[in-house]
Amino acid sequence: MNDSGTFWLPEAASTVAAEVDGLFYFVYWASAIIFVGVVAAMIYLAYKYRRRDPNDRPEPVEESRLLEISWIVVPTILVLLVFTWGFQTFVTLQTAPPNAYQIQGQAYSYGWNFEYPEGAQTTDELYLPADRPVQVRLSSREGDVLHSFYLPQFRVKQDVLPNRYTSVWFEATEPGTYELFCTEYCGVGHSQMLGEVNVLPADEFDEWVAEAGINEDELSLVELGELQYQRNGCQGCHSLDGSAMAGPTFQGLYASERAFADASSVEADENYLRESIIEPDAKVVEGYGSGIMPSFAHLSERDVTALVEFIKEQQ
Ligand code: CUA
């Protein structure tokens, strides 16, 4: 599709996009034509029947059956047309083909994780095959808030909820890079909750997905820690380069002196790091708020140890 988009809508890159756009532009142009017609008639009639003399009295208006029927019938037809068209498009958007490729998506404050049937996992990057229906099953991380999954070029948008699955399907028509937005205000990091959609030709996608499957048991603790750092969204609040975000940077954190609001302090050893992952509010460094970081008590022992080892590497 060689369509670079308009002022109203970005380029169209999925099979359902044409249907959505057709309906959108029908409503848009119908509204524009009716608006111009009504305003023009109003101005013309106001001028034509303006009062010319203080003694002017309006003539009695005679009822026009034809006019009255037409202003009931024409809008009814327009409204029913938009309803039928919209309902059909809605059903298409809701009914995934049974052979759709299944991807699991998890939203968290503030990012996206995707998991593919072959074992690959990605963060803030969604990989898809072109010309093949894809269904993304979405949920928000337990204890997290609502987000919304929006692919503007594909014309699909779906709320993402904690403790419940929702799903969305589409078929990309053109390999390329597209945008993923969170489109529900979810907190301070909402505007950064972005992702990239990479649509690959079918054979390239098969190659990618075969290579991207990672066997965690074969990773070293530091490598696994880096993976967990990305997968759990730690990077949303903890930088590796010393810059301050919602949480303290990991650079130089290990073995440093941590000062707390009550004027006490400890050295950041392994047990301190571990406690801060499992029970983030136990010791909150001065200058940072409590209740911001969720607990990661659900991580396995090896994952927690891997994160600790990864943080120790950031000197
Ligand atoms: Cu997530 Cu806005």
Image (cartoon, rainbow, N blue to C red):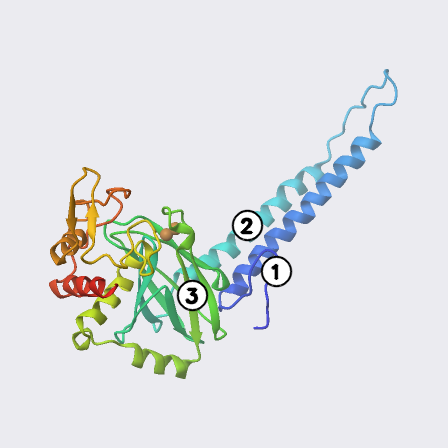
Q: Considering depth in this image, is 78 or 147 the residue closer to the camera? A: 147
Residue 234 shows which numbered tag?
Answer: none
> Could you give the CA–CA distance between mark 2 and mark 1, rounded to whole angstroms?
27 Å
Q: CA distance from mark 3 to mark 2?
A: 38 Å
In the rendered structure, the answer to whether residue 313 lies left or right of residue 133 reads left
1 or 3: tag closer to the N-terminus: 1
Closer mark to the observer between disc 1 and disc 3: 3
Q: Is residue 7 left or right of residue 97?
A: right
> What separation in Å lies between label 1 and label 3 (alpha carbons)?
21 Å
Beta carbon at label 2 within 8 Å of ligand 1? no
What residue does disc 3 label?
Answer: 196
| Rendered image quadrant of residue 296 | bottom left
Give the crowd class for mark 3: few <14, some 14-19, many >=20 residues within 10 Å: some
In-front residue for pair 59/162: 162
Amino acid carrying label 1: it is: Thr
Secondary structure found at label 3:
strand
Q: Write down the residue under mark 1.
A: 6
Is 200 above or below relative to 288?
Answer: below
Residue type (three-letter) at the residue carrying disc 3: Glu
Q: Confirm whether residue 176 shows in the render.
A: yes
User: Which residue carries the number 2 mark?
Assistant: 80
